[in-house]
Each structure stands twice: as structure tokens, then as C-alpha cells.
Image (cartoon, rainbow, N blue to C red):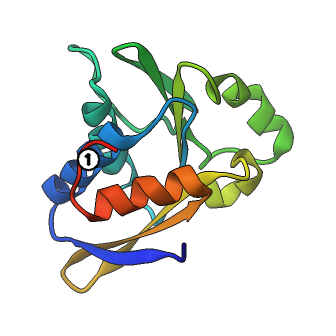
């Protein structure tokens, strides 16, 4: 499947809502890479994903720029939220412990993935957010059958696979 988009998002609420739908569709072991300029809405989309995954009460998704990775309990799964903005190279990346987040029980969302694309496994979903004329434009780049199916369901407005 080729890149899908642009999906036009005219407000932060639209971004959260799309993230909620995406979070409901994400499967355990999923890896989502978020790219876009500062302030484009990467953390806002991650907030929606957490909401869609059922983030537990009392947790608030914020940018992990200084902590590098934050973990949020979402029912029987964990959302691992990694930010690569301050990562200088492979050694810094390895020190985040992100490899433990990929696999059973977790979903990994990576902001600034373009800084260290090696974090992405062969099958993944990349999301590019850019400024548009009236809000934001979002593009989905699925790699792998499961991610292609997820994108089909997302674009069809379905909340479950």
C-alpha cells in the first residue's frame, strides 16, 4: 500500500480524535513512528492513541523530550512513548530501553522517528504530520500487511479491525 493522505485535521481535537480511532485499532507489538516539525501535533496524536488504548485514569500524556521514554498503562497493555529529539546516535538510542517496549504487552509510539529510523522494525506504521493551509495534513505510510489493514480500517472510519 502506498502512502495514504493527506488527511486534513483542522484542530487539535481532530488530531486527538484520529489518534483515539488509531489507538483502538493498534495491536499488541505495534510500532508507530511519528514525524513532523516542532508543534505539528505528534504529542497530540500520541495523546489520542493513549485515549483510544484505554489509558488508565490519572495519567496524562505529555512530550517525553526530556525523559526520552514514558510508559502509560492502558488496560492489559502498555503504551511506550519514545521521543528521539535529543537522541544523538545509536548509543543514546540503546540507552532508552526501547527494545523492551517492542513485543508482548506493548505498543511503541516514537516521536521524531526520522532522527533514528533504525528504531523501526521492517513492519510498522509511519505517520507524517505537516502544516497545511488550514490546520494540519497527515499522511499514513504502512509497512506490512497488518499495518495496511489497520490503515484501511482507520480510513473507513472503523474503530475495530
Side of 159 where 5 appears, left or right: right
| Secondary structure of residue under mark 1 | helix
Front residue of 58/27: it is 27
Is residue 146 visible to us here? Answer: yes
Left/right of residue 11 with respect to residue 85 in the rendered view: left
Q: Which residue is mark 1?
A: 21
Instruction: From the viewer's side, name the closer residue of 61 and 30.
Output: 30
With respect to residue 6, does 22 lie above or below?
Answer: above
Percent x, y for residue 57? Answer: 21, 14
Q: Is residue 65 above or below residue 4?
A: above
Residue at 37 percent across and 77 percent down: it is 5
Residue 118 on image: x %, y %: 77, 51
Q: Is residue 109 above or below residue 149?
A: above
Which residue is drawn at the image coordinates 69% and 49% (left, top)? Answer: 120
Q: Is the residue marked by circle 1 packed among few (<14), some (14-19), or many (20+) residues within 10 Å?
A: many
Q: Quadrant of residue 1?
A: bottom right
Task: Give the image location of residue 77, x and y in percent.
Answer: 44, 19
Residue farthest to the right, as pictured: 91
Which image quadrant is residue 130 in?
bottom left
Q: Residue at x 38, y 62 (%)?
A: 152
The location of residue 102, given as percent across then percent down, is 64, 30
Res 67 seen here: no
Residue beneath the point at 72% across and 47% down: 121
Left or right, 89 with respect to 79, comes to: right
* Left or right position of 60 against 86: left
Amino acid at each position: 500500500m502506498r502512502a495514504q493522505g493527506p488527511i486534513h485535521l483542522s484542530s487539535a481535537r481532530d488530531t486527538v480524535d484520529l489518534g483515539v480511532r488509531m489507538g483502538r485499532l493498534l495491536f499488541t507489538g505495534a510500532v508507530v513512528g511519528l514525524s513532523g516539525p516542532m508543534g505539528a501535533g505528534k504529542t497530540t496524536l500520541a495523546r489520542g492513541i493513549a485515549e483510544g488504548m484505554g489509558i488508565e485514569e490519572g495519567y496524562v500524556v505529555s512530550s517525553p523530550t526530556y525523559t526520552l521514554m514514558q510508559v502509560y498503562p492502558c488496560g492489559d497493555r502498555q503504551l511506550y512513548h519514545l521521543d528521539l529529539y535529543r537522541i544523538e546516535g545509536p548509543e543514546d538510542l540503546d540507552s532508552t530501553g526501547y527494545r523492551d517496549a517492542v513485543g508482548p504487552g506493548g505498543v511503541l509510539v516514537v516521536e521524531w522517528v526520522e532522527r533514528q529510523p533504525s528504531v523501526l522494525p521492517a513492519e510498522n506504521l509511519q505517520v507524517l504530520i505537516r502544516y497545511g493551509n488550514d490546520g494540519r495534513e497527515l499522511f499514513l505510510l504502512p509497512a506490512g500487511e497488518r499495518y495496511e489493514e489497520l490503515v484501511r480500517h482507520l480510513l473507513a472510519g472503523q474503530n475495530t479491525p
